[in-house]
Amino acid sequence: MTRPIITLRDVQKYYGDYHALRGITAEIGEGEFFSLLGPSGCGKTTLLRTIAGFEDITSGAVLLDGQPMEGVPANRRPTNMVFQSYAIFPHLSVAENVGFGLRRRTDLDRRAKQTLVEEALTMVGLGGYGARAAHALSGGQRQRVALARALILKPKVLLLDEPLSALDKKLREQMQFELRRLQRQVGITFVLVTHDQEEALIMSDRVAVMFEGQIAQLDSPQNLYRRPLNRQVADFIGVMNFLPATVSVEDGQGINADVAGLGRAVIDPEQAPGGATSGAACVGIRPEMMSILYENEQTDRRIAEGVVEERAYYGDMTYYDVRLDGIEKPVTISMKNIVGRPVLDRGTATRVSWDARSLVLFNAA
Amino acid sequence: MTLKERLGRLGRTEAANGYLLVSPTALYALLLLAVPLATILAFSFWTQNYLDIDTTLTLKNYQEAFGEPLYRQLMLRSLMISGAVTLATVLTAFPIAYFVSFHVPQSRKSLWIFLITIPFWTSYLIRVFLWKVILGYNGVLNATLQGAGLIDEPLTFILYNANAVVITLAHAFAPFAILPIFVALEKIDRSLLEASQDLGENRLTTFLRVTLPLAMPGVVAAVLIVFIPTIGDYVTPRLVGGPNGLMIANMIQTQFLKLNNAPLGAALAVIAMLLVGAISLIFVGLNRRFLRGPK
């Protein structure tokens, strides 16, 4: 990580009796694209608002660029925010919206401000839209105006509160890409709040997964997906099958697991990021880490036997629920629909191949 | 296409249904608003000879209305008084509306609005008389101030003059000003205020740059709602205005009922309506600037 631009030290926040933030400690680096990911009500927006200065914290500390922010109101913090509703001023034109924060820049004359506004609009792809009335914009355009309005002030940190949730799928994907490009171009630290795990994985350098006012795991997208610390994180990021297992740990060496439905396996300690103890445990495996073997297909991977219980055809992929011998709950397996792989019917007896390296070990529960 | 076919087609359209729905109200408005207005307008171009109305068209009434200094003075005073009433009402209503909208918890807002309207359950006339009691020579206000030793002589500038008219009317029209301003403030998306702060403005400049401009439609509505009826108010100046607090409506009444000169009264009424209309149009025009469109 680069030099920290945001430092959160044991941030606690109560709303009356409700404990909204339960000790958040994290550092966010300069120029980083950082995401706060979690289900609604997990405190991610509250955390963003404490950084922006819209919420006081009950205890702990928020530091921006090394400066403690206690008692500093939102208008004097080096942060700018893109609101979920975009908060475009309806009584102002696009250019007036974008130039709103420039009024205090007494070092610039009117012409210089106009140039800045036009540059900012061009940067977000709205060059020439300055004279338009703000209410005549589409959702995607409002989003861009909100971005230009925040970025024109060159904040140290740009805070984005679920900025893409109101857009349709196509536009959202396009904006994800553009946000990422914009962030690289301006080099400003972006902190994104989202409940969409895919969005967080696509866009971020690092992601903090939050549950109930706490950070459950703070990691790179790849580590979050491959080595989730616990079942809650694993379940929230993508899809994972959980199988009961019995584990015996041999003094710091390999971990021997007897996994229901799959059989015996030796698991690398790296694949037990939450630590491992002997006894009852739980093993996770992603749907794409297993494959269904077609009749004459050969493999040097491990094989389990099962029956297709249900299938869902997505066009490029087919998701199968396969009940493996020895366990009640079927496992989900995703298969790319390539030539030579017909979509299997329900009730088809099938062989499933898997690899011990793709197993993740969790403590029981 | 025959007439019958046309009528049949018309009967089936949305528009016909609409006309049918509004027709009772439209008829009522036509009979009780348009007809009297047209009568007033007609009268203003006629003249009265003792008991007969001379229906020859003439501009004599308007010449007299504009020529006579008394009428001009009354018209000007009416404008000044209702201007002062409007200013006082809107300036006091805004903080109340702001407080209820921004500082009263959501669940209590309707209660507050309800409480604000309670004084207005009593008749307008009774409230005017009450102000007489409060402002009078031996009234509540003077007695209190004297009792507190703040004044030796009762204050006389508070009753039977223009001040009394302004105070009474400002009170009478307060809820009509509070409500539209409150509604306009309620409609302001609170994230706009946060956005303004986020962009570097403090609370005062946020109010000036965001809250006030967005509340302007409500303020303009309040101005119109207070200004239009007060300029023609007749009861309040009659009861608390004294000789120097009389307004144009009192003169119109005098012309019609006492001086037996309905045409001149009608001309004064028409002039007053035109003035109000012109001033209202200016405010509506101002409002356009703040109403660039819905959010």
Image: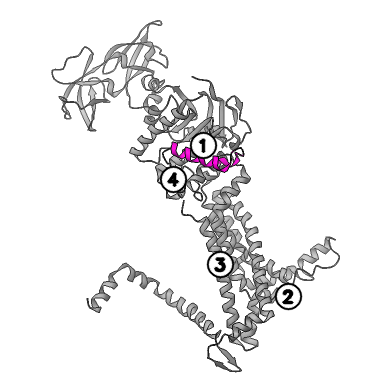
Task: Report the residue at 39% width, 35% height from top.
Answer: A175
Q: Alpha-carbon neighbours of circle 3 within 10 Å: few (<14), some, or many (≥20)?
A: some
Please identify the quarter of the rendering in which residue A303 is found.
Answer: top left
Image coordinates of residue A289 in percent, x first then y, are 28, 20
The Cα atoms of the two marked residues, 4 and 3, are separated by 34 Å
Q: Chain of mark 4?
A: A
Please tell me which residue lies in front, B50 or A57. Answer: B50
Q: Specify the label residue A152 is tagged with.
A: 1
From this viewpoint, is residue B103 visible? no
| Mark in the foreground, 4 or 3 | 4
Upstream in the sequence, badge 4 or badge 1? 4
Mark 3, residue position: B280
Q: Alpha-carbon neighbours of circle 4 within 10 Å: few (<14), some, or many (≥20)?
A: some
Mark 4, residue position: A129
Q: Chain of mark 1?
A: A
The Cα atoms of the two marked residues, 1 and 3, are separated by 41 Å
